[in-house]
Amino acid sequence: ETGVTQSPTHLIKTRGQQVTLRCSSQSGHNTVSWYQQALGQGPQFIFQYYREEENGRGNFPPRFSGLQFPNYSSELNVNALELDDSALYLCASSHPGWGLSTDTQYFGPGTRLTVL
Amino acid sequence: AQKVTQAQTEISVVEKEDVTLDCVYETRDTTYYLFWYKQPPSGELVFLIRRNSFDEQNEISGRYSWNFQKSTSSFNFTITASQVVDSAVYFCALSGDTEYNAGGTSYGKLTFGQGTILTVHP
């Protein structure tokens, strides 16, 4: 069984640029969630995708956007990068059982984004 | 709003000591789930356990055990006979049943604590 994979591992961008991060969900999982983890903090929920649509969103501005593809993989796009966007971006996949809100989320290794 | 508090920022122990990581949560949901994840230096969050709000039985898995007390809104994690490989950041997280999008569908938002850095010395 293949786990959650993310690419790239590390990325360096400058302020104002745009970035795309990618995630492949665990085999059999059709829901993908994205989290931002600043240094020394717990992960913060960005949004969740289910059936190729944004299913829920945390307190992040519209310049954070995403996509989910028919194979359940997902992209996180961040426009107009700011210095505070520097963080570890984690993708998690889950397979809805009897409730999307209660499913266990399995995480990938993350993408470390540095904005200069 | 949901909240998870891990009051212990850092814990340092010597190998073979027992260690307990505290987690206190706040929620208005009647149905909710609690989780523990381990984050080694590699960065990946490793799932350890999920517990629903209606199951207050303690659970043991090898050297790991969890104590869920609804009366005190706590979900503490104990490692018995700690080992160097247990060194990591540990996160407690909460997911409730009242996160709904505009279409009325629930979604799984995990609310994490700040994490506890555990260092086990040989």
Image: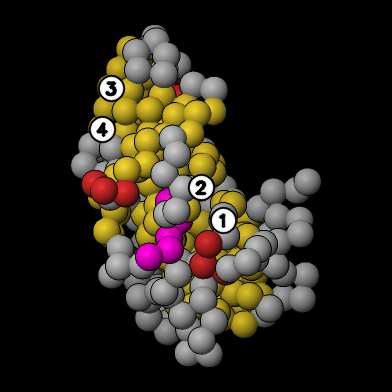
Q: Nearer the viewer, residue A116 or B75?
A: B75
Question: Which element carries disc 2, helix, strand or loop?
Answer: strand
Q: Mark 1, residues whose alpha carbon is within 10 Å: few (<14), some, or many (≥20)?
A: many
Question: Viewer-nearest of labels 3 and 2?
Answer: 2
The numbered mark, 3 or 2, whose residue comes first in the sequence reads 3
Same chain shared by disc 3 and disc 4: yes
Same chain shared by disc 3 and disc 2: yes
**Residue A79 seen in render:** no
Q: Nearer the viewer, residue A32 or B21?
A: B21
Task: Determine the CA span between mark 1 and mark 2.
Answer: 10 Å
| Residue occupied by mark 3 | B12
Chain letter of mark 4 equals B
Question: Viewer-nearest of labels 3 and 1?
Answer: 1
| Residue occupied by mark 4 | B10
Question: Viewer-nearest of labels 1 and 2?
Answer: 2
- Tell me: residue A88, above or below residue B47: below
Residue visible at 29% across and 53% down in the picture = B25
Chain letter of mark 1 equals A
Same chain shared by disc 1 and disc 4: no
Does the CB distance between marks 3 and 1 fall below 8 Å? no
Disc ID at residue B50: 2
